[in-house]
Image (tube, rainbow, N blue to C red):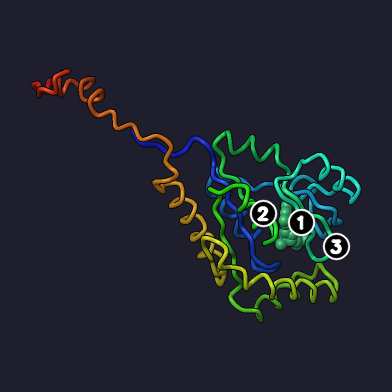
Amino acid sequence: MIREKSKGLLIVVSGPSGAGKDTICNKVVEDMKDTKISVSMTSRAPRGKEVEGVDYYFISKEEFEERIKNDEFLEYAVVHNNQYYGTPKTKLEEDINKGKNVILIIDIQGALKVKEIVKEALFIFIMPPSMEELKNRLIKRNTETKDKILERFKTAYNEINEFTKYNYVVVNDRIEKAVEKVKSIITAEKCRVDRIEEIYLNTKEEFIHEGLIDEEFENKELEL
Ligand code: 5GP
């Protein structure tokens, strides 16, 4: 018997702000019930309609540093020059062990750290269709000051050149298409031979059990 690993898959999704990572991943988990998004911790303040425990766990810089000392993060990074973002370890390990696929929506620095620690993780880069479109999306979001938009645009420019470090790249020109692509990648990865846990080629036992052969491998009449 062949079956998928009982452990879930760790999926890392990165891409510049405005590429559509959150929208895509939210739609993916709506459709794939065995897949969820990990909630990160951050020292930045909530923006717009963000909800504690849903979008992020919002904590102070001091608390974040305390948690770093206590080794509570799988990875963490300082993003956009001055704010901490990190992936809490305990819940993530629990979910993966229970068989859930967990998506981390994290920046490239964090992704590269995860790559060192979790060799079997899956890395997907979400690419905006063009820099022009990315700029328009960031402006349209209307959640940031002009300076912050410019900073995000600069970070995006640097990040885009790193996509070759990922296993897959998905261009988000149309959201539905991008969602389908991410779902297909996850499904295909779960079927990969090196992700298959147990291959019981117990043919002899199974055949004896089914009454197809006896101990000496002699064919028997099949009784139906
Ligand atoms: P935002 O402030 O727009 O919510 O996120 C800024 C950036 O931080 C995004 O690129 C996002 O992917 C990244 N990010 C969010 N959570 C984490 C995390 O836990 N670890 C790392 N390394 N980056 C994160």
Q: How many other residues sit within 10 Å of disc 3, few (<14), some (14-19) or many (≥20)?
A: few
* Label located before the other in sequence (1 or 2): 1
Label 1: which secondary element? strand
Instruction: Give the image location of residue 143, x and y in percent.
Output: 81, 67
- Above or below residue 22? Residue 52 is above
Point 63% across, 72% down: residue: 160
Mark seen at residue 77: 1
Q: Name the residue beneath numbered marker 2.
A: 113
1 or 2: mark nearer the eye: 2
* Label located before the other in sequence (2 or 3): 3
Q: What is the three-letter code of the residue carrying label 1?
A: Ala
Q: What is the three-letter code of the residue carrying label 3?
A: Asn
Quarter of the image that includes the N terminus: top left
Label 2: which secondary element? helix
Q: Name the residue beneath numbered marker 3.
A: 82
2 or 3: mark nearer the eye: 2
